[in-house]
Image: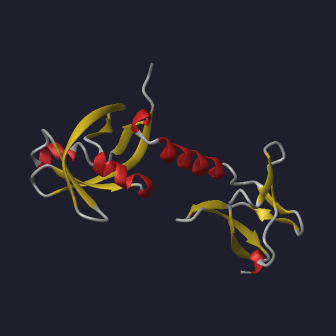
Amino acid sequence: MPMNYIQIGFTRKTHGIRGEVKAFIEEPFEDLFFEVERIFLEIKGIKQPFFIKNIRGSGELIVSFEDINTREEALRLQSRGIFLPENEVPAELLQALQVVNFYGQLVGYTLIDQTLGTVGVVQDIIQMPQQEMAVVPYQGREVLVPLVEAFILSIDEKRRHLLMNLPEGLLEL
């Protein structure tokens, strides 16, 4: 059975002459990244394991791998996706990802408030620390609408409608 992988970040440029690379890890996966012993990098279309020797830095991380000891060896690792097997990612992180991916599908849907009627077409979904926000043009400006279950009444995939019960005054903010 083929293994499924989740991309948790990507490598950037090499760092120094000892085979280190800079890495960006998506925020939900940062803690997990510090706990794992190895990650997978996609090289020539194949996910290959690399064992982590050391991680340092904050914000932009600098990672060294076992058996990668020179800048030349590290060059082939730069600008690569960083993956973990799906079965090694905690269930709560996977569920959070599914919610994000689900809401991302709402771009292009018409947002309709049960009281005000048509608000506008969802232009984008923005990931905020508290929740996802739909970017919707409304009366000549862009408004951010929180995508929380309490506000969503129904989603009509056929008609591409998102019916919501927005709190009074939300669109005036």
Which residue is depicted at the point 72% across and 54% down? 108
110 relative to 137, above or below: above
Report x, y in % for residue 166.
79, 68
Which residue is depicted at the point 43% across and 33% down? 87
Image quarter for residue 27?
Answer: bottom left
Which residue is depicted at the point 60% across and 49% down? 99
Residue placed most toward the observer, 7 or 36: 36
Here the colouring is: secondary structure
Image quarter for residue 141?
Answer: bottom right
- Residue, far top: 1
Left or right: where 163 falls relative to 99: right
Report x, y in % for residue 31.
35, 54
Left or right: where 114 falls relative to 130: right
Left or right: where 161 falls relative to 126: right
Report x, y in % for residue 139.
80, 76
* Quadrant in the picture for the N terminus: top left
34 relative to 90, above or below: below
Which residue is depicted at the point 29% across and 47% down? 35
Report x, y in % for residue 66.
15, 40
Residue placed most toward the observer, 156 or 122: 156
